[in-house]
């Protein structure tokens, strides 16, 4: 039986400092820490590659700050992944922090076969960057994009954050214009969420954040401005030039299989979901895999697909489950059409940008009543 290639994710848990809004697993690491991490990751890729015996057609280095490993260490990991997991015509992405890489970094990555970069801009407004605790300037982002392009990268994504402290419609427009002027192919635009156990959460009473109505206006403004700049919305928070949608991330939203390596990384393989604990010491001794149960049911698939602009489609349900969209999903979804939250017809259920604003509650209601 020929099995569909999976996605491969490598979590790099190193950061120079922790952004006050971030709840991802990361730590400050010495050069020795990074070397030990890479040596263990090489063993993990080999052992698990033999265990699962699957081919991958996407590889994503996330974090943390993967660029802090340096181009040579990243090259070793790419080479190992290719030898063990195939990576035939794969999309290979590395997350990069502007201003935190060495000369020749992008040239070395291109030689290694990396063909996509994701950079953390967050905002082109210096005051907003300061309040977000970012270590870079907008000028450093522009320079990093330029150097990457000169090295031959033609698939670059920038991250934006929406509804951050002191953000206005005008400052958001300028940030979007900045991204477009840089000539990048993909933009991820995330609404700020104040997560527990972050400095922002402890300071939440003193944060100057937009209220719910202002947040909605900023999100819808971003959707309009990005569309006008040629970035089509294909997921709640993701926009791309035609043909530059993230192949790796689409695996998550299409409930396709992927293997995650590294502390805090999640996996979905052979109908099972599991993850590695947020524990670097445990990873270095040998990563334990904690079960999250079964995965891949129609309900789970529908929940993920409704995050996409294409929505939940009859054709896909028939192909994957040999059944149409459940009638109760369609019935519940139609209730929200008049409010402009959902587009529902015989072919699909799709959330509008207004619907994406309340997607968690809306999707739960459509699927569970």
Image (cartoon, rainbow, N blue to C red):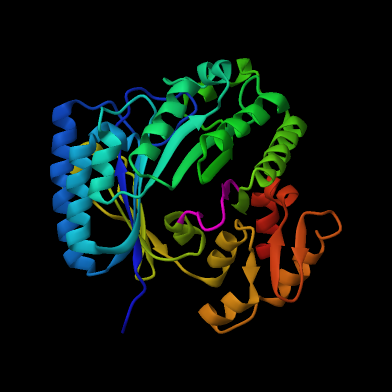
Q: Is residue 239 magenta?
A: yes
Q: Is residue 243 above or below residue 22?
A: below
Left or right of 75: which side holds 302? right
The magenta-colored residue range is 236-246
Q: Position of residue 81 (x, y in %)?
A: 22, 56
> Magenta stretch: dominant SS?
loop
Residue at position x 69%, y 40% from top? 225
Q: Is residue 97 above or below residue 278?
A: above
Task: Tell me where residue 15 sits by quadrant.
Answer: top left
Q: Position of residue 116 (x, y in %)?
A: 38, 48
Left or right of 168: which side holds 8? left
Left or right of 181: which side holds 113? left
Residue at position x 55%, y 27% from top? 123
Q: Which quadrant is the C terminus positioned in?
A: bottom right
- In depth, the one of 47 and 83 nearer the eye is 83
Task: Tell me where residue 36 sits by quadrant.
Answer: top left
Camera sees residue 48: no
């Amino acid at each position: 039986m020929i099995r569909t290639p999976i996605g491969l994710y490598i979590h790099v848990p190193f950061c120079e400092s922790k952004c006050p809004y971030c709840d991802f697993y990361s730590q400050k690491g010495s050069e020795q820490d990074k070397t030990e991490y890479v040596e263990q990751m090489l063993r993990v890729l080999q052992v698990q590659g033999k265990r699962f015996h699957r081919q991958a057609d996407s590889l994503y280095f996330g974090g943390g700050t993967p660029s802090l490993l340096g181009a040579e260490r990243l090259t070793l990991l790419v080479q190992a992944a290719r030898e063990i997991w195939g990576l035939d015509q794969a999309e290979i992405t590395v997350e990069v922090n502007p201003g935190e890489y060495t000369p020749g970094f992008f040239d070395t990555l291109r030689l290694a076969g990396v063909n996509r970069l994701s950079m953390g801009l967050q905002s082109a407004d210096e005051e907003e960057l300061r309040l977000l605790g970012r270590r870079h300037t907008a000028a450093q982002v522009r320079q990093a994009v330029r150097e990457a392009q000169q090295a031959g990268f033609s698939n670059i994504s920038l991250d934006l954050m929406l509804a951050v402290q002191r953000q206005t419609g005008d400052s958001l427009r300028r940030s979007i214009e900045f991204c477009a002027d840089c000539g990048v192919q993909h933009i991820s635009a995330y609404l700020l969420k104040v997560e527990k156990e972050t400095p922002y959460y402890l300071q939440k009473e003193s944060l100057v954040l937009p209220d719910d109505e202002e947040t909605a206006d900023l999100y819808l403004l971003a959707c309009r401005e990005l569309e006008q700049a040629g970035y089509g919305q294909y997921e709640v928070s993701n926009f791309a030039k035609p043909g530059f949608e993230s192949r790796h991330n689409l695996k998550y939203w299409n409930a396709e299989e992927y293997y995650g390596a590294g502390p805090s990384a999640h996996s979905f393989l052979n109908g099972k979901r599991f993850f590695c604990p947020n524990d670097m010491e445990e990873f270095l001794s040998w990563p334990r895999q904690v079960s999250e149960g079964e995965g891949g049911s129609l309900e789970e698939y529908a929940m993920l697909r409704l995050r996409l602009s294409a929505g939940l489609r009859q054709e896909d349900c028939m192909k994957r489950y040999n059944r149409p969209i459940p009638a109760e999903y369609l019935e519940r979804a139609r209730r929200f059409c008049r409010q402009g939250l959902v587009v529902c017809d015989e072919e699909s259920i799709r959330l509008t940008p207004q619907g994406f604003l309340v997607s968690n509650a809306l999707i739960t209601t459509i699927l569970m009543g």
